[in-house]
Image (cartoon, helix red, strand yellow):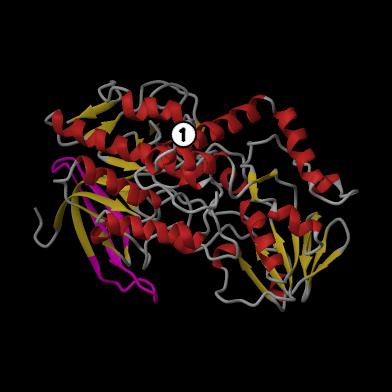
Amino acid sequence: MAAGIEELDVVIVGAGISGISMAHQLGLDHPGLSYAIIENRQRIGGTWDLFRYPGIRSDSGMGTFAFSFRPWTGTRHFGTGQEIRNYLEETAAEYGIDRHIRFEQKVTAAAWDSESARWTVTIQASGEGGDTGETTQIRSRFLVGCTGYYRYDRGFSPRFEGEEDFKGDLFHAQQWPEDMPVEGRKIVIVGSGATAVTVVPALAEAGAEVTMLQRSPSYVVSVPNSGGIGDWIKRFFSRKRAAWLIRWMGVLTEIAQFNLSRRYPNFFRRMFISGARKQLPAGFEKRHLNPAYDPWVQRVCFAPDGDYYEAISSGRAKIETGNIERVSSDRIHLREGGELEADVIVKATGLDILIFGEIEMTVDGEPVDPADHLVYKGAMLSGVPNFIFVVGYTNASWTLKSELIARFASRFISEVEASGAESGMPVAPPGPMKTVPLLNLDSGYIKRARSRLPQAGDRSPWVLHMNYFSDRRELLQADLHDGAIRYS
């Protein structure tokens, strides 16, 4: 044991939804375990502390997006970014999790040593000015990655020809300038995904002249932001029972939407496009509404109370479908002809995928390249002992999967201890196996990163389900002495 190195049972990396969920579960099931949450930012929240663009909100209903152990009490179906961040902070304080968080600390390396059966985690102090150069180390039995799946310091930002000549503001939505004036300004949002669909109505409401420039449309479905059966349930059941019912109703709805859309794509394509056209003026061009892919090949976007379509119908926002040829001092020139005047250009062009943060991981001195490893139950890597990671659903609420993996982590720790072992490591099966990337949607930012992602297999326990009930069975009920984990 090296002098000066702190000893803990568990190191959790990240204080967002996944990190708080993990800490709560471990504290509940293993109150004697020592743990720390290492967080690079100054505050709790992860995504919900990072993103500051106008209108930022959840894109899943809060009945499933909130924690099961602390139900959402807001009246809106979709929580705002600030509401969600406050909720996470209050949750961490209520359960004493905040006392375990070490802010402005960045995990730069994690080295597993089989002889001692410990991770040595290297941490660099960070701050508003960047890394300070001061490093510390923690030695832990288990390491849990709750870092999400994208870079925090930048989004995917394609370069536009001539963008350096633009005289206005040009930036990625992930780096939205604080307090930037928008009223009366011509703002072009480049992109058609969830960020664009969220930003457009918020900017229109704030008095901007908004154009959403898309290469191809996305499916955008209007849903109520309040009322409905959830309010009825709250009137007739206790708070605890109502939250349970609303959560399960949300789970079933999300699964049904996804599975039925994939099974009957033509029906849902017609239904989604027809629903959009009914909310827009007569004669609105169908080419702006007709995606080149089936529903849920990429994530379907939701518009609370139809705010996206209302902004377009009112004339405060418009859609343009085309490709950028170049940017000049005050406008975007389209390859198809035509120009878009702009005071501000916002790239809502997706995330820059980064799995496990920028942590340099090694096992007995050998570097760990995630792309070379199979995913065990969607939560561990083959050949990497005592390491659990959280990546939530791409087709449903992130929190649903993060809570399942937190419970699995607790089971795994119990199994290691009950076996009299120091570690458990998934071992890839011999012979070839058909594989698919960890993230299963066809969005551009995901396709660009597939060569860097861990792979899922074609048979249990290596299958990536992306289905809550299948994952409940696999993560919470299946035997952890399944021959795929080597305990030692």
Q: Which percent across, then down, holds residue 153?
A: 48, 64
Instruction: Out of 219 and 280, give the one closest to the viewer.
Output: 280
- Please name whichever residue, 114 or 12, is drawn nearer the observer in this view of the structure: 12
Q: Amino acid at mark 1?
A: Trp
Helix, strand or loop for disc 1: helix
Direction right: furthest residue: 283
Q: Residue 352's x, y, as percent?
A: 53, 54
Q: Is residue 364 visible?
A: no
Closer-to-camera residue (367/86):
86
Q: Is residue 233 above or below residue 435?
A: below
Q: Which residues are magenta?
A: 106-135
Q: How many marks?
A: 1
Magenta span has 116? yes
Position of residue 297 relative to residue 153, above or below, is: above
Q: Which residue is located at x 17 percent, y 31 percent? A: 488
Q: Quadrant of residue 327?
A: bottom right
Q: Residue at x 60, y 33 (%)?
A: 257
Q: Is residue 337 left or right of residue 50?
A: right
Residue 469 in view in this figure? yes
Expressed as whole percent of the image width and height from the top left, the position of residue 194 reads 62, 51
User: Residue placed at 57% from the left, 76% from the top?
Assistant: 179
In this view, the residue farthest toward the front is: 236
Q: Residues within 10 Å of mark 1 (few under 14, many from 20)?
A: some
Q: Height in image: 2 above or below 387?
A: below
Magenta stretch contains residue 239: no
Identify residue for label 1.
248
Vertical comparison of 181 with 397: above or below: below
- List x then y, in percent, for residue 448: 58, 46
